[in-house]
Structure formats: C-alpha cells, structure tokens
Image: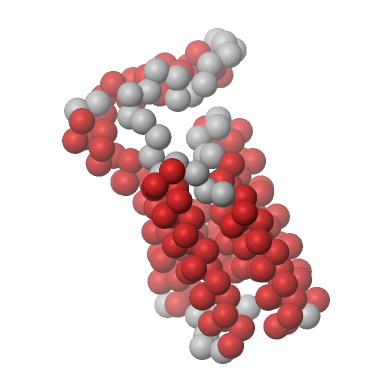
C-alpha cells in the first residue's frame, strides 16, 4: 500500500499509527515502558486494517512487515546485544504490521540514526561521552573476543534513554523519504 496517498485506507492506518506511537512515547518517557496492552492491539489492528482494505494482499503486507521487523530486531540483538527493550521491538513490529516491510526498514534505519543523535546529547551534557565509549568498547571486547559473560551496557553511567522517541523520529523521516 502506498501510505503517502490520501485514500481512506492510508489515512486510517496513519491515524492508528500516530495515536499508538504518541501513547507509546508518552509511556516510555513517563514510566520507561512500552506496554503490551498497546503494542499487541496495534499489531492486530495493522493486520486487520490491511486485510480489510486490501484482502489477502493486505494480509501479506502485514506479515511481511512483521517478518522484516522481527528480522531486524534479531540482527540488532546479535550485533549489539540487548540494546533494544522488548517494548521497543514490539513497537517496531506493530509499525511493520501497520505499514509493511519497506516502511519499517526505513523507519529502523532512521530510528538508529536519530537515536545516535538523541543519545549523544545527555552524554555530552553530563561530560561522560568518552567514558561511555570506552566502557562500551571494553564490554564488547570482553563479550565477543574474550567470551566473558557481560552485558554490553554494564558499567554504564548514561542511564536508560527512551528509544521510542528515536522510533517516532524514524517514522516521521520514513514518511518524508517515501513521499518524495
């Protein structure tokens, strides 16, 4: 589906995505959690709406979007360890179910880029950027080269940052990219 068009299907999906994403960002910033009671209904809504508006072809778009999101999450987990929380992953899966594989791939790329910038701000402001990079590289070295059981975030002073904000930026940038 072309999510940039003005037809009823695209508009409905955009409204559901905007409402769900807004609430997820709110709960992530406020409580540090993205709740299953929202992500699972969003996944089901994506599958239902795409199926309703496009039949079996829409069902396939949702399934492909879910598959692309899960594949990206597994890849990121293998490369960076448990950097994304479960709620972040389920939110990305919901975006895949609503908007399909191409959109979720662009969203993930832009979210990673936006997240890098968003997370640099508090590190630079608190003067712990060099410490954080050194700690992260040391943890990666111990985990993958020395095969020691270590969490890549162990020893972090940066604190947890709500990644849903970066996902929101990724969604906005994906819409901009795919509209041009």
Residue 168 drawn at (x, y percent) = 43, 59
Quarter of the image that includes the N terminus: bottom right
Query: Which residue occupies 19% across, 28% down?
Result: 127
Asked if one can make out residue 163 in the rendered structure from this viewpoint, the answer is: no
Please give left or right for residue 65 compared with residue 12 in the image. right
User: For the view shown, which residue lies furthest in the right direction?
Assistant: 56
Does 17 sit above or below residue 94?
A: below
Color theme of the render:
secondary structure
Residue 129 drawn at (x, y percent) = 26, 29
User: For the view shown, which residue lies furthest in the bottom direction?
Assistant: 7
Does 172 sit above or below residue 12?
A: above
Residue 33 drawn at (x, y percent) = 50, 44
Query: Which residue occupies 47% across, 59% down?
Result: 23
Query: Which residue occupies 50% across, 80% down?
Result: 4
Query: Which residue occupies 25% across, 41% down?
Result: 121
The one of 141 and 153 positioned closer to us in this rendering? 153
């Amino acid at each position: 589906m072309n999510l940039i068009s003005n037809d009823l299907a695209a508009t409905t999906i955009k409204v559901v995505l905007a409402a769900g994403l807004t609430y997820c960002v709110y709960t992530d910033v406020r409580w540090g959690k993205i709740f299953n009671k929202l992500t699972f209904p969003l996944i089901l809504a994506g599958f239902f709406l795409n199926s309703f508006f496009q039949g079996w072809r829409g069902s396939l778009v949702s399934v492909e979007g879910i598959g692309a999101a899960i594949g990206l999450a597994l890849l990121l987990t293998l490369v960076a360890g448990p950097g994304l929380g479960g709620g972040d992953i389920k939110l990305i899966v919901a975006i895949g179910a609503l908007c399909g594989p191409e959109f979720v791939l662009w969203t993930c790329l832009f979210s990673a880029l936006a997240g890098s910038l968003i997370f640099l701000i508090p590190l630079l402001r608190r003067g712990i950027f060099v410490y954080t990079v050194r700690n992260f590289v040391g943890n990666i070295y111990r985990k993958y080269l020395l095969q020691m059981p270590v969490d890549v975030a162990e020893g972090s002073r940066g604190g947890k940052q709500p990644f849903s904000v970066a996902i929101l930026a990724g969604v906005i940038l994906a819409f901009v990219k795919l509209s041009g």
